[in-house]
Each structure stands twice: as C-alpha cells, then as structure tokens.
Amino acid sequence: MSQDFLPLLGTDHIEFWVGNAKQAAFFYQKAFGFTLVAYAGPETGVKEKASYVLQQGKIRLVLTTSFNPDSEISQHVLKHSDGVKVLALGVDKHFTKRCHVAQKLTHNQKLFLTNLVKSK
C-alpha cells in the first residue's frame, strides 16, 4: 500500500485580495454570519496593508487590502477586481517538516532523491 503523497487535512483558509477589506469584512459578518477573529493593520504595526480574519465553523476567510496603490495587491485588484488569491491547505506537522527540509536541499540533492524514489 503506497503512502499518500500529499496528506491533506482540509482547507486552512482562503485569502481574498479586495479593494476595501473593512467593508468586505462588515458585509461577510452581517450577510453571512461570520465572526471577526483576528485583524492586522496600522493599529497592530502593519503599515502597508490590512487583513481581517473571519471564521464560521471550519470556514476561515482572510480579507486583505493594500494602502499602497503600487503594491502587488492593489495592482491585482485593479486588474481583476476582488477575488481569491490564496487557497491554503491544511497538512499535518510531519508533512510541513518534510517541506521545510525539501526547501533547503540543493537541486542535485533533489534530483538524487527523486531518482532514488523512482528506482524503488
């Protein structure tokens, strides 16, 4: 029996890049019953953007807006309008550790490990 390559536990959160995160957070709270569970912005020392984390049961949304019109977030919203930018998947801590180790490997080490796995 082969081991699951990507052991997903579900969705961790979905991040939306929006033109007005404060207004969007208010809408999601009033229209859909989400609860505000976290905030980051100028009041918390984050000067370039604001993010509101909303939750309802297992659903977690992050609504982010930029204060800089030249930022990647603002340019994305200008081109595409409000929308999903990040879909974060939940994985177990052992998989996370393997990913961190894999990021530190050189290209040749990765090729060696890939060939080693293929040969088995």
Image: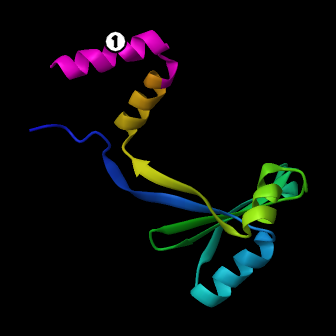
Instruction: State the count of labels.
Output: 1
Which residue is nearer to you in this view: 112 or 30? 112
Q: Is residue 43 above or below residue 34?
A: above
Quadrant the C terminus occupies: top left
Asked if residue 110 is among those painted magenta in the image, a careful observer would answer yes
Question: Badge 1, how many Cα within 10 Å: few under 14, some, many 20+?
Answer: few
Q: Secondary structure at mark 1?
A: helix
- The residue under the point 31% across, 20% down is 114
Quadrant the N terminus occupies: top left
Q: Is residue 2 above or below residue 27?
A: above
Give the quarter of the image for residue 62. bottom right
Relative horizontal placement of residue 81, taking residue 3 as reference (left or right)? right
- Find residue 7 and report its horizontal and vertical position in percent: 30, 45
Amino acid bearing label 1: Phe
- The residue under the point 32% across, 43% down is 6
- Find residue 13 and report its horizontal and vertical position in percent: 53, 60
Magenta-colored segment: predominant secondary structure? helix
Q: Which residue is mark 1?
A: 112
Relative horizontal placement of residue 44, taking residue 61 as reference (left or right)? right
- The residue under the point 66% across, 88% down is 30
Residue range in magenta is: 103-120
Q: Is residue 97 above or below residue 8?
A: above
- Find residue 23 and report its horizontal and vertical position in percent: 78, 78
Q: Residue furthest bottom?
A: 31
